[in-house]
Image (cartoon, rainbow, N blue to C red):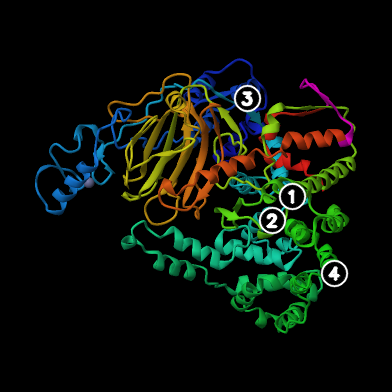
Amino acid sequence: MKNLIKVSLRQSAIFIPAAACAQSVKEISETSTILLANARKLGFTFSEPLLHALNAAAPKLKHEILEALREVMGTNKNWTPLVKGWDIPTGESRSDHIIAFFANVLKLNWGSKLKCGHYIPKKTFPLERYNGCPFCGTPFQQEELKLNEQGSKLKVLDLWKEDDMTNYLNDLLKSKTALDATQVESLKTLILSFDIPNVAVAMKETLMLLIDTLVEKGDAEKAASYFSTPNDILRYLWYKKTGFLQIVEPKTIINKTKENNTHLFNFFSNCNTASLDKKKALKLKYSRKECKMVASWLNGLSMSPKKVCEIMHPKRNMWVRFIRALRLAEYSKKAGFEQLKTILDIFYNKKYKVWQGILNKNRQQFNAEKSLRILKEKPGVFARSLFSNMLWFGDDITINAFADVVDQVPARLVFSLNMYADNYFKPNGKRSVKTLGGIRKTIDTHPLLEMYDQKQLDGMKAKIEDLTLLAMKKRFAGVPNKSKTIYIDPALFNMPVSIGERSENVQDMPSALMGTRFPLEGNEVRLFMQWGEGMPAQHLDMDLSCYVAYEHKAQFCSYSSLTIPGCQHSGDIRSIPSKVGTAEYINIDVDKLETLGAKYVSFTCNAYSNGNLTANMVVGWMDSKHSMRISRKSGVAYDPSCVQHQVRITQPLAKGLVFGVLDVEAREVIWLEMPYYGQVVQGLNLNGVETLLNKLDSRLNIGTLLNIKAEAQGLKLTEDAEADEVYDIQWATNTAAVTQLLVD
Ligand SMILES: [Zn+2]
């Protein structure tokens, strides 16, 4: 039940089963009052329907709701930083560290000996200011969290019943873009509690999650009915092996593990053993039962064996390994597995056409007509290579050929063409792309761009825009609609359709789309990071930092410079205490930064120790009209009622992460997620952040898409929310439902 409550909370609601609140009671009960008061301390309040339903519900359910809210807001965790009253700098210096280093190496008993065994020489660190050892960053003391209710903006929660939950499940299954990490967690929870509705699953990634649930339930046969190509099977096997919903090749995973384990100082690096371990982990090993299951799946595919092999070809090396590990040759000799036998025979003897090979040959020979004809056989591939083919063969001939098949391309792809054209046709530029492994990279643009002048490139962009707009309009026009009027919330014109940028970490608080702008209420933003909850005491160095970008310079606030103009860090913790975790904070004085002329502040966190960034970490930021307290006694500075947004880090491959950008002048925090390499914040490149911000500002946003719909379906735009069709912010928070605008 608690998990279901958490799913609804992500959608700004609380799920109460109909049976638990048979009647709606207006008179507020005592237990409801208590729950409401406690929820306010955590930054939440209830809508009227929710309150009426709660009045009728049993105290046990109310208790579960409170528990869920407390877990999400982390009130049971330790929030004590290293320094007491850390808003006043301790004045610790480089030389303090150096003197302490010699005292400890030479075992000079020059001052106080701490629990961790370190000597802190007199006249170095002001020990009375620390909750732990300033030298090694191990905390000793903790203070319990007090809830001060300093927040100035409560988040209103609504009532959800069974219908809302199943509708949401439906939306997730039908989502026309791959689900983000929050949606994946919600989907997994919902499938376990509700019947799987009979809907067409729109995305392969979603399908894998569904199949996985069926297989876990022991219903491999039903799962078989969902496989349509051998790639689906490969994708499922790879997902089970690596946890990736897309097929990320083994070498990519191994390289990435290696990079994540490269320590700043080579001396401490264990990258070679780490990649060896990963290699071992990627070795395939299957039980008899699993081998038979996959053999029957392949054997049962309805497409022709030749076609099966053609599709298997681009991942031939992976297939060879899987066929061996799954002992498929052995099964193909058994009665009833004749189809599998034919497939393996064709595959091993390469008695199939290699589509890509034929295409490449014609492309190299510059045979435009033939190449484009081959491309038309695979509209999806054509769409993905449209831009480079325009540069190679010329824009008109390529676009005309593509126009013939554009109707067969999923709307998601058509739409993204227009989104990416701007970014692509930029000469002398850098492009920001995201690799399958989830890392954002800045890459050089296509060399052929240099052959064209700006006017020609602008012409190419315009042609793509015309084509995609026409295609989208045609699709909307093809959907009958009885509505006459439409209301589009102006804020939707600032929200990109979530095609390329998916959040990879989980938002347990009411979730927001990447690109959402949070206006500030106060003059201070407080970043927080909590990690290590539930883990035994150990060395586990995670760093919270921020990057202040000025026009001509940049400054970092991090473990190595705790105090910079406008920012103050709470001290570098390098070891966690047992079970409760530990915290770091940064205070950002927005007024001061504005006076100093700062443009942006990027919020970042990364792992300083070897390994990946996980460790049950939560990062986020606080904001309030009222002043936010910092305990003199302990330095605790967390107040759940002030949290504007937070994310739980779940992506194991990312090394460092940008989790928000403060636009100083606009006084807004833009929520985004950008993983990056490099151990320290200096590894982050300002260009990268600006490129990403540009991308979020894409012209093709939800509002524009709705405008196209209105035009194509002859709907009249109105200013009031009483229209036949209403699209507001509330509607947009259900991203899966928003993707239904991508009509195929
Ligand atoms: Zn120490």
The mark nearer the N terminus, 2 or 4, is 4
For the residues marked 1 and 2, what is the alpha-carbon distance in whole angstroms? 8 Å
At horizontal 73% and vertical 44% (from top left) the residue drawn is 170
Residue range of the region highlighted in magenta in the rendering? 712-724
Q: Is 277 within the magenta?
A: no
Which label belongs to residue 370? Answer: 4
Residue 79 in the image, given as x and y percentages of width and height? 37, 35
| Closer to viewer: mark 4 or mark 1 | 1
Q: Residues within 10 Å of mark 4 (few under 14, many from 20)?
A: some
At horizontal 71% and vertical 38% (from top left) the residue drawn is 699
Could you tell me the amino acid type at mark 4? Lys
Disc 2, ligand 1: is the CB inside 8 Å?
no
Residue placed under numbered mark 3 in the picture: 50
User: Does residue 506 appear in this view?
Assistant: no
Residue placed under numbered mark 2 in the picture: 449
SS at circle 3: helix
Residue placed under numbered mark 1 in the picture: 457
Which of the two residues, 369 or 218, is positioned nearer the viewer here?
369
Could you tell me the amino acid type at mark 3? Leu
